[in-house]
Image (cartoon, rainbow, N blue to C red):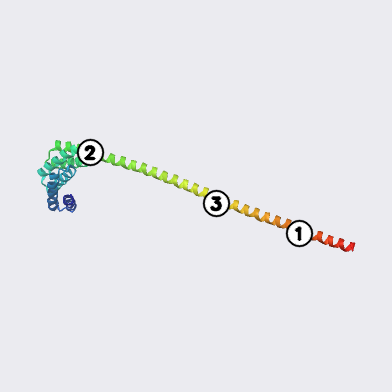
Amino acid sequence: RYHRIYLVSTGEYYFLQRKYHQALENFLKGLTYHTQLNDQNEIQRTLIFIAKTYLALGHDSTAMEYGRKALQVASRTKAKHIIRDAYHVLYSVYDRFRRTDSANFYFRHYTVANDSIANEQVKAKLAAFGYNQQIAALEEETQTQQERLSKSHQQKTFLLIAIVAMLLLFAVMYRNIMLKRKNEANMRDILQNELQIQQLGSEK
């Protein structure tokens, strides 16, 4: 599979470089492999490239032959891009032959197919835009929830610190009160002892 795909990809490269004879050689080899494996998608794709290459070389009759083959396969597989390109090849050939009726026929079909593909592309872009908007809305909602959670966590942390501080304050206050009461009790005991000592002294 890699080898036959490589042949067609190389052919496309040569085609874009306008090295049509090298491109055609690769396309024809690739078509042979695709046909042996009955790979309909690659067959129709390679057929339309062969048709375009023959058209570029000025071999109009051969371009028409391969254009018709590409159209026949693509009509079965519903490959709109191949159908559109096949219509364009056939229109171009008939236009060169100055067969106006046939050229206009295929040009109209080409225009309809091209508009259909363009509309689908616009719909796909709109759908993608709507999807991106949904993603953005979800991200915004997620961020808002995270901010709320963070704020709630901060509030809980602050409340916990406040409770601990109050408990420590109460503990310190309780300790001071208990120490004060202990000191007062000690002072009373000392005063009572002193009074008892004074009373004993007076009695003596």
Q: Which residue is mark 1?
A: 186
Q: Tell me which label, 2 or 1, sits earlier in the chain.
A: 2
Mark 3 and mark 2: Cα distance apart in space: 65 Å
Give amino acid for label 2: Ala
In the rendered image, residue 145, in percent from the top left (x then y), is placed at 47, 46
Instruction: Give whichever of 34, 62 is nearer the camera.
Output: 34
Task: Give how far across and how far down residue 77 sits, in percent.
Answer: 19, 38
Of the two numbered discs 2 and 1 in the rendering, the one whose residue sits closer to the viewer: 1
CB contact under 8 Å: marks 2 and 1: no
The residue depicted at 78 percent of the width and 59 percent of the height is: 189
In percent of the image, x 69 and y 57: which residue is there?
176
Query: Foreground mark, 1 or 3?
Result: 1
Q: Quadrant of residue 175?
A: bottom right
Mark 2: secondary structure = helix
Q: Which residue is mark 2?
A: 113
Q: Looking at the image, how many numbered discs can be counted on the residues? A: 3
